[in-house]
Image (cartoon, rainbow, N blue to C red):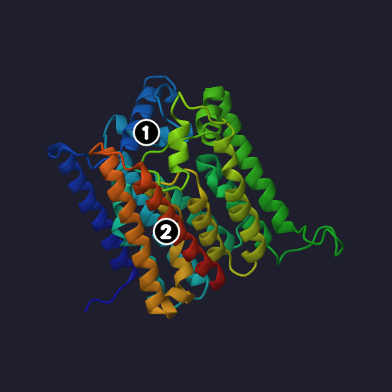
Amino acid sequence: MMKLTTTNLIGAAALMRIAFFYYGVYQDEHAEIRFTDIDYFVFTDASKFMAQGGSPYDRATYRYTPILAWLLLPTTTYFWFGKLLFALGDIVAGWLMLRIFKIRGLPEDQALRFAAVWLLNPMVATISTRGSSEGLLGAMVIALLWAVYSRKIVIAGALAGYAVHFKIYPIIYVPSILWSLDNSEKILGNGMFRWVNKDRVKFALVSFATFVLLTGAMYYVYGHPFLLHTYLHHLSRSDHRHNFSPYNILLYISSIPSIELKSTYPSLAFIPQLFISGVFLPCMLAKKDLAKTMFVQTFAFVTFNKVCTSQYFMWYIVLLPFYLPSSAMLKNKWLGLRAGLLWTLAQALWLQQGFELEYLGNSTFFPGIFAATLIFFVVNIWILGIAVEDI
């Protein structure tokens, strides 16, 4: 039996993504249903507008930083470049995981097995090779975690500011990182401000400065459309398609012009979500284990998000390898099997109802979609409870 090594693992992960990539090209050319995600066409269209001297926001539904469209400018020459870049992001994230495991003192054989949960995960490989940019974001988050564990505070601050500019939600990690940076020279003595230390101030200033500089530069070039589409849009976003969230039906109702629903509703959904993932969990857990805390934060953020699609699962799957080594789900195999099975079955139930609705045109809103979203939500809350107790 071949011994698992870093080279073998990275090589297998690369081969898996190459195979998925070429399969996707074949399916796009020969099948009725495309393999490539619709978002990939949005990205590449935005890059095309930029290459012609226009704005990425000339492309309807482009809701991202212009930096993403800049990164994908080579797609104007080779259309599939973006997929390869996103797949490379997966592999970089996996390689950085191994560096972090080494810092945390995990034996190499165990580190390789847990990194394989990300690197050899077919769901992860599929999402990246379909053209979703989550692989790039995953690499940023793991690079941020590596920088913190390596005590490279300036680099960590720059990565945090860049990640928040790129996709907003990594802002939930900032309180956890700040709270975890304990062992540093105090600046204001041992009084009521004893928590103010050199590393915390450095991280806060660099992350804030990086975010402001990037956001200010993008605003200077692209004006209000940048703020509107990249950030403000998400406050009132009401996407109900492919949405696993329990808010799904209410979002659908609010999208019907003839039905008046308070426009503040989508924004109010952020209150419980941000309190749990950005305040409560960091305060309770960050000093115990930063990597595991970031996992449960992200799991909670996605679970309570008013829009929850399959791509969002990537946000916490990239941190799952850090939770698993001492988790109750591995110590108690039956518990782990039950959690994995229920999560998969609940998702499959929703997908079956969603397929009936979105592809066959059958009205499955109630009780089908409604019941499926609640079941999936309850299963996720149960798993979240187990994960929080583990830390």
The answer to whether any part of residue 318 appears in the image is no
Q: Are marks 1 and 2 in contact (CB under 8 Å)?
A: no
| Mark 2 crowd level (few <14, some 14–19, many ≥20, 10 Å Cα) | many
Q: Is residue 113 left or right of residue 171?
A: left
Count of numbered marks: 2
User: Is 111 drawn above or below residue 312 in the view shown?
Assistant: below
Q: Earlier in the sequence, mark 1 or mark 2?
A: 1
Instruction: Pick whichever, 74 or 365, lies toward us.
Output: 365
Q: Which image quarter holds the N terminus?
A: bottom left
Circle 2 SS class: helix
The disc at residue 317 is 2
Residue plotted at (60% across, 58% down): 152
Name the residue type under label 1: Phe
Q: CA distance from mark 1 to mark 2?
A: 23 Å
> Residue 45: image x %, image y %?
34, 28
In the picture as drawn, the residue positioned furthest to the top comes out as 53
Report the residue at 53% width, 66% height from top: 385
> Would you say 169 lies left or right of 28 here?
right
Please state the horizontal and vertical placement of residue 195, each as a whole percent of the image: 77, 60
Q: Quadrant of residue 391?
A: bottom right
Considering only vertical position in the picture, is 202 above or below 41?
A: below
Picture quadrant where residue 317 is located: bottom left
Residue 245 bears which disc, if any? none
How dense is the environment of label 1, judged by Cα within 10 Å: few (below 14), some, or many (20 and up)? many
Which mark is nearer the camera, 1 or 2? 2
- Is residue 72 at least partly visible in the picture? yes
Residue 22 placement (x, y as % from top left): 19, 47
Q: Secondary structure at mark 1?
A: helix
Q: Which residue is mark 1?
A: 43
Which residue sits furthest left?
30
Q: Nearer the viewer, residue 257 or 336?
A: 257
